[in-house]
Amino acid sequence: MIAIQRNSVEIPAILKEGSDKLKKELAAAIAYYADPANTKAFKFKVYSNPEVKETLIKMSDGKCAYCESDILVTYVGDIEHFRPKGEIEELKETKNSKPGYYWLAADWDNLLLSCRNCNQKSKQATTTEAELKSMGKMNQFPLFDEAKRVRSLEGDFNEEEKVRLLLNPCIENPEEYFKYNIKSGVIQAKIQEEFPKQRATTSVKVFGLQRVPLVHARAKKAVHILKQMTRVERRYKDLLRAIDDEDDDITERQEELDWEIEELHSFLDEKEEYLGMARQMIGQFMQKNFQVDITAA
């Protein structure tokens, strides 16, 4: 899971403030939910405009905003509502689970691109539990303090944001919250303070980031990165030997090393899957061996 820059793309025209379709749909939804007799979900259409998904795909480089998997190879991707619009699953035991944050149904800042496994409910196994369990975000939006939840259009999100337990990749930098076991592909909380740690562990659970196929895919990517690191180390040793022996092929050895480092850095391309793990691995490797900070501008 990595940070996503929402301002890297232009807001779809249909979602811009002042859009006639946006204003009409919001007014209709407000009127609909004002009547307690309306218990079925309002049918929103504006957010499903093709331009919206196209822009979300561009914003996230075609990857799931949560698990970083390349979606488009096998699926068209879901338009995911970070704050669920129809129902809030945590409140199902009460009479107030519906509606959700319906007024954010077509709010650009509430939309992300997600894969089916992170967004929809399905039976899956995790690395810690072989028994299949239902996972996927769907209508979940847990808070550290339920009393701070906003339930109306007039509500103030300032206090709710302070107790939000799901990481928003367009607001937080998930790399500050997670670390990866490169041998197993398991994602773990990086920090130990109570609230940040709970935010990390809750996000892993709700998005299903420990599901077995995903963990195996990360582990496989880690193996490829480790192999390329080995090639870099070999070429570096070749260069040092050439320098010590004052060989005539120092330039050639340097070129070979540069090429292998360039190949290693290809794992850091924004379009690559599991970039968070790659940055952790390559960042540590380059710092240790070459005193290079890959995060430096």
Image (cartoon, rainbow, N blue to C red):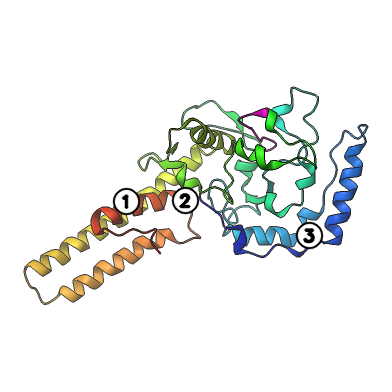
* Nearest to viewer (mark 2 / mark 1): 1
Q: Is residue 293 above or below residue 201?
A: below
User: Residue 20 in the image: x percent, y percent?
Assistant: 86, 61
Disc 3 marks which amino acid? Glu
Q: Is residue 12 magenta?
A: no
Q: What's the mark number on residue 17?
A: 3
Residue at 54% from the left image edge and 46% from the top image edge: 67
* Nearest to viewer (mark 3 / mark 2): 3
Q: Is residue 142 magenta?
A: yes
Q: Quadrant of the C terminus?
A: bottom left
| Magenta residue span | 138-146
User: Which image quarter: residue 118?
Assistant: top right
Are discs 3 and 2 less than 8 Å apart at CB? Answer: no
Q: Secondary structure at mark 3?
A: loop
Per the model, the C-alpha gap separating discs 2 and 1 is: 16 Å
Q: Secondary structure at mark 1?
A: helix
Mark toward the start of the polypeptide (3 vs 2): 3
Q: Is residue 69 visible?
A: yes
Mark toward the start of the polypeptide (2 vs 1): 2
Q: What's the mark number on residue 189?
A: none
Q: Is residue 282 above or below residue 13?
A: above
Disc 1 marks which amino acid? Gln
Are discs 1 and 3 less than 8 Å apart at CB? Answer: no
Give the residue furthest to the top: 93
Residue that numbered label 1 is attached to = 284
Q: Left of 154 or right of it: where is 159?
A: left
Residue that numbered label 2 is attached to = 274
User: Residue 223 in the image: x percent, y percent?
Assistant: 35, 49
